[in-house]
Image: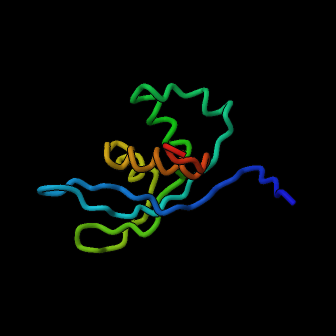
Amino acid sequence: MFKVTHNPEFTHDVPVQVPVDGGHLEQKLRTRFRMMDLDQIDAFDLSTKEGNTTFLQRVVIGFEDLVDEDNNRLECTDALRDRMLMQPHIRMGLTQAYNRAVYKARVGN
């Protein structure tokens, strides 16, 4: 049987390559996503910063297990989510993870 879900959501650990002195450090960003259908996705111009930002604001519900520099837990507010979405390395990781999750296809397969 195939289960029909009217408002599908899912959580994935998103690998994000965080720039550090001399290279990158991979961190996992536990992210709650909202799935959109193709008609909804077509409404966004993903080739522009504005369109891509609006798309990510729509599909990224929030983040879990966040801490600050002193390892104090942070609550993920919409303002914090939006600030994080403006970081290029985070955007790249989220976009790739969403596409992998929804399409479950890897380049070359």
Residue farthest to the left? 22
Please tell me which residue is depicted at 52% across the width and 37% down the height of the picture.
55
- Please state which of residues 28 and 67 is positioned toward the viewer in this rendering: 28
Q: Is residue 107 above or below residue 71?
A: above
- Quadrant of the frame with the N terminus: bottom right
Colour convention of the picture:
rainbow
Residue in the picture at 61% in, 48% down? 102
Query: Which residue is the extreme one toward the front?
Result: 109
Q: Is residue 71 left or right of residue 40?
A: left
The relative height of residue 47 versus residue 24 in the rendered view (above or below) is above
Q: Is residue 45 shown above or below 6? A: above
- The spot of residue 76 in percent (x, y) is 44, 60
Looking at the image, residue 10 sits to the left or right of residue 97; the answer is right
Report which quarter residue 15 is drawn in.
bottom left
Residue 100 x %, y %: 54, 49
Count of marks, rendered view = 0
Residue at the spot x=33%, y=69% of the render?
67
**Quadrant hosting residue 86:** top left
The percent coordinates of residue 90 (x first, y second) are 36, 49
In the image: residue 29, left or right of residue 11: left
Q: Residue at x 54, y 53 (%)?
A: 61
